[in-house]
Image (cartoon, helix red, strand yellow):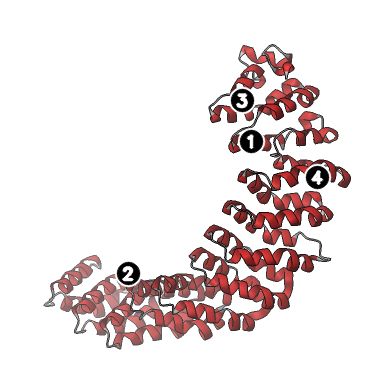
Amino acid sequence: MAGVAGPGTGQGAAGGDGDDSLYPIAVLIDELRNEDVQLRLNSIKKLSTIALALGVERTRTELLPFLTDTIYDEDEVLLALAEQLGNFTGLVGGPDFAHCLLDSVRLLAVEACVSIAQLLSADDLEALVMPTLRQAAEDKSWRVRYMVADKFSELQKAVGPKITQNDLIPAFQNLLKDCEAEVRAAAAHKVKELCENLPMEGRETIIMNQILPYIKELVSDTNQHVKSALASVIMGLSTILGKGNTIEHLLPLFLAQLKDECPEVRLNIISNLDCVNEVIGIQQLSQSLLPAIVELAEDAKWRVRLAIVESMPLLAGQLGVEFFDEKLNSLCMAWLVDHVHAIREAATHNLMKLVQKFGKEWAQNTIVPKVLVMANDPNYLHRMTTLFCINALSEACGQEITTKQMLPVVLKMARDQVANVRFNVAKSLQKIGPILDTDALQEEVKPVLQKLGQDEDMDVKYFAQEAISVLALT
């Protein structure tokens, strides 16, 4: 590229006086060939300035060929170049010369393809854009293929339904089974958008025959990021494919993902249950997915149980209070007496979130009575769980429920035979004290704490005296 080889050529020479807006072309060339990747990246970002300095004709005839001939580079530099070229249409003379850009860089003008495709006729698209896209979708660099996957929805809209069917669908199939997990994950993220953007006529057939078989493979992918990406969008297919297809073809996939060992996959399925609920109804949903949820909730591995416990508030919100009370309430109560402390602790926190979601009246009628019954449990760990629940629920339930229903049980437990229970009574009274009114504190709480303050157990005595001090009951 002789015309661009020296600093004295064309308007670029003006950069020699220090005006950064006309960056010297000779320096650009040096930096493009520099071993330092960052310098090469910096020069790429100056390309629009160079193109302005050269003018549209010399940009087409000199700068673009120079880039094509010179840059066989790191993927990062090539991606930056492709991004720049996506905004180059005006700098090469407008839409009539847009095709020049597609010949300029080694199969990396995916960004440019998106911009240029919107400007061309169907015939020009097939002749000028599609060869580049086909090559990019099969490029040896996974970053190029990743970019194709990441831009797929935009490409689909730009090229239209005919080319999508003939070219993009086969390319998308290849991306879904790409050897690189990053590419598969990027493509999986686009599954719902691809299906939504297909023409209504023939859409179901295309999805069922050409997309769904590849989705089924991804459900059992070896990479958790791929599975998680798919789980975040797959539920949305139910609204596109309808009730019959959802029940027959999608529900088995949802069930498999709901049982996946990766927590994020399970969470993504639970987070989007409302999509499926709208299509197949709560009855069908409960018959199909609920057994799997119950099975996980009772899994022998406590970490699996924990994942479901932590997902329960979200699940409850998706399914509603009536369904929750009928199908899931008993599970939540059972977790309170789990033999693993982490489960009991999470279950307590879970109840608080449920009360925040469903309200005080629900708590008063549904949760609080069941929690308080545990105060009489023979197992002292379960009696302590009652106190932990009261600690968690008191603020959400408010003063009246705490004073009338919870406080009497806490005070009664101050006479428990187990010291661990008694000092947790002191801690609970300290926790719920700020919610109570002055009369309750002075007339009911203070005498009990004073008695515990004289307890024979040192820990009980310590926590009782601490509560007296914090609540200013001296």
Q: Earlier in the sequence, mark 4 or mark 3?
A: 3
* Amino acid type, label 2: Pro
**Residue that numbered label 4 is attached to:** 118
Q: Helix or strand or loop: what does disc 2 sit on?
A: helix
**Residue that numbered label 1 is attached to:** 78
**What residue lies at 57% left-to-right and 62% top-to-bottom?**
221
Determine contact: label 4, label 3, CB under 8 Å. Answer: no
| Residue 351 appears left or right of 188 | left
Determine contact: label 2, label 4, CB under 8 Å. Answer: no
Q: Could you tell me residue 290's position as x and y percent?
A: 55, 80
**What residue lies at 40% left-to-right and 79% top-to-bottom?**
335
**Mark in front: 3 vs 2:** 3
* Amino acid type, label 3: Leu
* Amino acid type, label 1: Leu
The Cα atoms of the two marked residues, 3 and 2, are separated by: 68 Å
As drawn, 62 above or below 451: above
**Residue that numbered label 3 is attached to:** 32
**Residue that numbered label 2 is attached to:** 434
